[in-house]
Image (cartoon, rainbow, N blue to C red):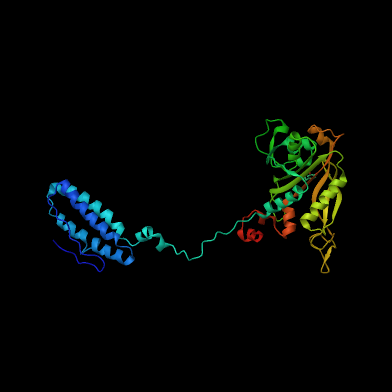
Amino acid sequence: MARPESTPHMPPIEIPALKDYSPGALDGFFGEILALFDQDASAATTVETVEELRIRWIGRKQGLLTRISEVLKGAPPEARREVGIRFNALKSAIEPRCDPEQLKATAPVTDAIDITLPGTRRALGAEHPLVRTMHEIVSVFRNLGYSVEEGPVIETDYYNFEALNFPPNHPARDTQDTLFIAGQESKPQRDRLLLRTHTSPVQIRTMEKMKPPLRIVIPGKVHRNDAPDATHSPIFHQVEGLAVDTDVTFSDLKGTLDHAMKALFGSSVKTRFYPSFFPFTEPSADVQISCIFCGGKGYRDGNRCPNCKSSGWIELLGCGMVDPNVFGFVDYDSTKVSGFAFGMGVERIAILKYGVDDIQLFYQGDVRFLEQFL
Ligand code: DAH
């Protein structure tokens, strides 16, 4: 029988003898060949020796498979089918293992990994600047003994407006500002769903389930029907606060917010309370802080300060003493308790703290912007 050339690394192979073409004899013949191949292939562990294996077994001219097919040509017609099936199975078992690519999949681990190389580092994630600012605000109040409450973003007209003492035709209920959920017309007005326009409804939800005294902060997402631009977004965030106890006064409100603003913007910041109006507080005030860009002077480097329009003050949040009508909605006795509330925009505070000039940057998910907050 023909003896193929031996290769530099592999001894010559002798094709086994085939006694007859019965299925049993064929199985034995092909089994022996496969065993020979296995033995040969186990020595092929480099690109070079796999190439030798390929030439030796499936090389077009001298390859063992070619020689085996020649031997099998002598098969009688009735055995051809059985021979063909076995030959094809042998071929498909051998061919893929003669491809140097398979070395990559089966190579021993020590060859594939150089453990002296530095590891693959995953970039550390960071808190989103809005989440970070929200946490910062919340922690200022937690340090004062406030606890955190949350409520639903999809709210009813009752919690968002009615129980907060918004009169039935208050302009804030207008579709200009509020995003209403469609198809609510068959419900009574107070049950109709909308996207909450502020975090204040959680004041009501909390007072319904907790008796005074209470001190809570409420971080959360809110929506208004505003077209997005550099200073507006239909989705934004607020942190609300509420303190109710006996003898809570406007001085407590002033002292608390003055402390909070100093904690957030630095101890040199001053606060000023400016008369305002909110349906759920009486009296109400807007809190202004001394301009953090010009130090409250109104001028910077001899020029008018653009950030405070040279007024020296920046308006930051709303607040006031809880209106007794609100206590009426939650069964608190307004002759025994009093309270103050406040609400601030998280974006607005983050914009001031970090000098961001476009609110949209917070929502675009651009890593080049976000990684500055690592
Ligand atoms: N809810 C108000 C708004 O979104 C902010 C606000 C003002 C909240 C005064 C309060 C408050 O709790 O007392 O504009």
Q: In this view, does 79 lie to the left or right of 209?
A: left
Taking depth in this image into account, of 227 and 372 the one nearest to the observer is 372
Q: Can residue 232 be seen in this view?
A: no
Q: What residue lies at 69% left-to-right and 30% top-to-bottom?
A: 187
Location of residue 352 in the rendering, given as x and y in whole percent from the top left corner: 75, 57
Residue 99 in percent (x, y) is at: 32, 61
Task: Count all numbered tags in the image, as a single digit.
Answer: 0
The quadrant in which the N terminus is found is: bottom left
Q: Position of residue 41 (x, y in %)?
A: 28, 59
Instruction: Give the x, y percent position of residue 47.
Output: 33, 65
Q: Which of 362 and 2 is in front in this view?
A: 2
Who is closer to the viewer here, 164 or 321?
Answer: 321
Apparent side of residue 66 relative to residue 352 in the rendered image (left or right)? left
Q: Look at the image and tell me whether residue 255 can be seen.
A: yes
Judged from the image, the quadrant occupied by ligand 1 is top right
Give the residue at x 78% y 57%.
265
* 327 on left or right of 19: right
The quadrant the C terminus occupies is: bottom right
